[in-house]
Image (cartoon, helix red, strand yellow):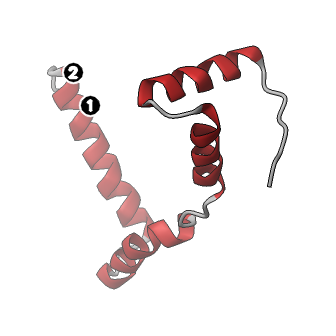
Amino acid sequence: MTITLDLPAETERRLRERAAETGRDVAAVARELIERGIQAGPTLDEILAPFRAQVAASGMTDAELDEYFGGLRDEAWREKDGNGR
């Protein structure tokens, strides 16, 4: 299939640069980028399913989970700042 696209000048410039950097023609690079862009990746629910299963198996409540991650966040801030806030 042949499709004609009107690209902004900056997009065309970047596409041509990418093609030159990889030693490929512009059409091949454009095709690859389009194919990559339309491939269906995992949904957020699919990505989070293992974590959600672990939380459910742990028996932690939402409040306990909030407290746990809040503590980790506070600890990371203290380590980053180095001042023991």
Q: Nearer the viewer, residue 48 or 32?
A: 32
Which residue shows up at 33% across the image and 77% down it? 54
Which residue shows up at 66% across the image and 56% down it? 38
**Image-quadrant location for residue 81:** top left
User: Left or right: where does residue 75 sit relative to residue 45?
Assistant: left
**Distance (Cα) linking label 1 and label 2:** 6 Å
Per the image, label 2 sits on a secondary structure element best described as helix
The outermost residue toward the bottom is 57
Which residue shows up at 69% across the image and 22% down it? 12
User: Left or right: where does residue 7 sit relative to residue 29?
Assistant: right
Which residue shows up at 57% across the image and 52% down it? 36
Q: Quadrant of the N terminus?
A: bottom right
Q: Nearer the viewer, residue 10 or 82?
A: 10
User: Left or right: where does residue 14 sit relative to residue 18?
Assistant: right
**Image-quadrant location for residue 29:** top right
Q: Which label number is shown at residue 77?
A: 1
Neighbor class of circle 2 (other Cα within 10 Å; few <14, some 14-19, many 20+) is few
Confirm or deny contact between disc 1 and disc 2 (CB under 8 A): yes
Query: What type is the residue that disc 2 sits on?
Result: Asp
Q: Which label number is shown at residue 29?
A: none
Q: Which residue is mark 2?
A: 81
Point out residue 50 in the picture as x, y percentages from the top left corner. 38, 75
Classify 62 as above or below 30: below
Query: What type is the residue that disc 1 sits on?
Result: Trp
Point out residue 56 in the picture as x, y percentages from the top left corner. 39, 81
Classify 37 as above or below 83: below
